[in-house]
Image (spheres, rainbow, N blue to C red):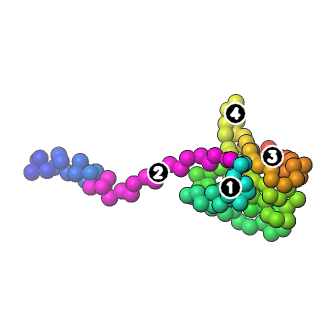
């Protein structure tokens, strides 16, 4: 009986481990390739595991999608946006111990309008 008493905790742990769901495979960071074009990039972003749309902001000329991990957000212009078509990615990173947001993107439409849109998003990130 003593043997079972000593083995019981190990057997219980083994049994619980066998029932535990496997951890999902980590998803690689998105690699932006502007040569693909707006529609292909949009489709690739929407197909990524764990990407969810942000609540719709009526009147705003863009769509936002975020990864469940919080690693990145994707901003895609809508047809009514002056910068359309354009896409950029906002990622959180640490620089000199401070959390900062970095942006990279592709301007397929008016470059000056894209620069204004990017400056707007960077100002929002800086205000956080």
Quote the CA–CA distance across marks 1 and 4. Answer: 28 Å
Q: Residue at x 73, y 57 (%)?
A: 38
Q: CA distance from mark 3 to mark 2?
A: 31 Å
Residue position marked by numbered label 2 in the rendering: 25
Q: Is residue 85 left or right of residue 96?
A: right
Displayed quadrant of residue 97: top right
Residue 8: image location, x then y, percent: 20, 51
Q: Which residue is mark 3?
A: 122
- Residue 40 rendering spot, x and y as whole percentages: 67, 58
Give above or below for 35 relative to 100: below
Q: Earlier in the sequence, mark 3 or mark 2?
A: 2
Categorize mark 4 by other alpha carbons within 10 Å: few (<14), some (14-19), many (20+): few
**Which residue is the site of mark 1?**
41
Q: Single out the residue that lies furthest toward the bottom.
A: 58
Lower position in the chain sequence, tag 1 or tag 4? 1
Q: Which residue is mark 4?
A: 95
In the image, residue 27 lies at what x, y percent? 53, 50
Q: Nearer the viewer, residue 113 or 97?
A: 113
Q: Which residues are magenta?
A: 15-33
- Of badges 4 and 2, nearer the viewer stands 2
Instruction: Label the magenta part by its dominant secondary structure.
Output: loop
Do the residues bearing badges 3 and 1 touch, measured as CB atoms within 8 Å?
no
Residue positioned 63% across, 57% down in the render: 44
């Amino acid at each position: 009986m003593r043997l079972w008493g000593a083995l019981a905790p190990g057997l219980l742990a083994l049994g619980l481990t066998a029932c535990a769901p496997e951890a999902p495979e980590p998803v690689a960071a998105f690699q932006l390739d502007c040569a693909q074009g707006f529609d292909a990039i949009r489709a690739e972003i929407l197909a990524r595991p764990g990407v969810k749309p942000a609540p719709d902001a009526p009147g705003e000329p863009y769509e936002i999608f975020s990864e469940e991990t919080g690693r990145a957000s994707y901003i895609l212009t809508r047809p009514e946006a002056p910068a359309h078509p354009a896409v950029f990615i906002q990622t959180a990173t640490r620089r000199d111990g401070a959390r900062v947001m970095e942006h990279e993107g592709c301007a397929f439409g008016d470059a000056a309008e894209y620069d204004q849109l990017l400056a707007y998003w960077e100002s929002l990130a800086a205000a956080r």
